[in-house]
Amino acid sequence: AEAEFVLEGVVRQGQRKAEGPFGDHFGHYSQVAEFPVFKIQKIRHRPHPVFPLSVVGKPPQEDTAIGAALQEILLPIIKAMHPEIADLWTYPAAGFHNLVVASVKQRFKKEAVKTGLWILGEGQLSLSKCVILVDDDIHPRNFSQVLKALRSYFNPSEDFILLPGTSQDTLDFTGFKMNLGSKMILDATRNGSVLPSPPAKSLDIKAIQNIDSRVQGVRVWEDAMVIIQVSGNGREIVDKMVKSPIFKNIPLVAAVSPDVPLNDDLLLLWGIFTRFDCERDTFFSEVTLSGGHPRYAGPMGIDATWKKGYPKPLEMTPEIIARVNRRWSEYGLK
């Protein structure tokens, strides 16, 4: 009775039609897929109804504010369920699900990992792809602080968990099969150990570029993550990087495509975390098998380049931009 609109109709069992591509909140077009058909018979509405909608796409968009508000509303409930959680944040720039950081006040060793596994099994949070765990004195909404924790405390031989062959968000295209992909947990809590510090002097950008001629740009983020902008085979280039002694004490090396700007934090997080599959596109300079436990060492490489089979990123056409600019006065926002 209080609805703005009521749609009446029938959904017939087994009836499917192709839907898409649509622009979605991961900043790319969705893949075309078969979905149930809703046959509308009547549309009812209030006088002067309000039709709610939000604009999504490459960040920042309207869903950024909506998602941030929802997180603030739900956080007290999460803390009541798991009192060890000091704060939790899903990053809007990464499409929310793709990057989750939780700060944990650990009451026993590796309690944070238990919390990370809970995140990957709880409701909508189970769609999370990359979960980073930090101590409760780290601000999870500040990615620079998160990177510093990774630089100081993340030891991949003990603190990296890969879960291959899991369910994932329908809109996540990186697994190449709808609803199937992989997930990972990075434990950057202290756990009683401190790793070697990075070199006192800054990394030599020119030396990094000289490793491969296809490197177009380099950004070093908190001496913890080196992002290289590349043309060509990202996996091949990052593989060279993680094996170079230049990156001895750097935990993360990521490759992005030329359309991802290195000087924009939001679009950089978008370009990295929406374009890689944990199982297929992350790797280390060293991997050994201890019984049934793979042990990783050295920097973790992430090939976050755009790959064949991925849908195109969302781009507004010049015509749409001109139309919106022309009609600003009609929107009541000026």
Image: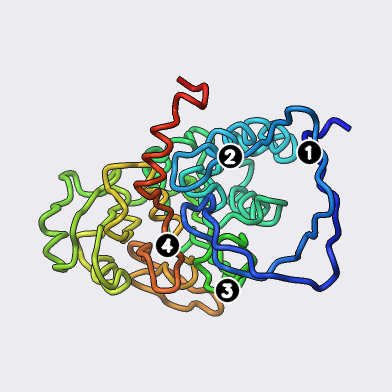
Q: Determine contact: label 4, label 1, CB under 8 Å.
A: no
In the picture of the structure, the residue carrying the numbered disc 2 is: 54
In the picture of the structure, the residue carrying the numbered disc 4 is: 312
Taking the image as shown, residue 89 lies to the left or right of residue 267, namely: right
Indicate which label's residue lies in the foreground, 3 or 4: 4
- Looking at the rendered image, the quarter that the C terminus falls into is top left
Indicate which label's residue lies in the foreground, 3 or 1: 1
Sequence-first tag of 1 and 2: 1
Question: Could you say where residue 202 lies in the image, as x and y percent from the top left?
Answer: 17, 46
* Quadrant of res 121: bottom right
Taking the image as shown, residue 51 lies to the left or right of residue 316, namely: right
- Looking at the rendered image, the quarter that the N terminus falls into is top right
Work out whether residue 275 or residue 316 is closer to the camera in this orientation and state it: 316
Sequence-first tag of 4 and 2: 2
Q: CA distance from mark 1 to mark 2?
A: 17 Å
Q: Looking at the image, which residue sits at the far right? A: 1
Please tell me which residue is depicted at 38% across the width and 54% down the height of the picture: 271
Residue 331 visible to the viewer = yes
Query: Tag 1: residue type?
Result: Phe
Sequence-first tag of 4 and 1: 1
Q: CA distance from mark 3 to mark 4?
A: 17 Å
Q: Is residue 34 above or below residue 328?
A: below
In the picture of the structure, the residue carrying the numbered disc 3 is: 177
Please tell me which residue is depicted at 43% across the width and 49% down the height of the picture: 193
Q: CA distance from mark 4 to mark 1?
A: 33 Å
Q: Quick one: label 3, few (<14), some, or many (20+) residues within 10 Å? A: few
In the picture of the structure, the residue carrying the numbered disc 1 is: 5
Query: Tag 3: residue type?
Result: Lys
Question: Could you say where residue 295 lies in the image, as x and y percent from the top left?
Answer: 45, 70
Indicate which label's residue lies in the foreground, 3 or 2: 2
Indicate which label's residue lies in the foreground, 4 or 1: 1
Q: How many marks?
A: 4
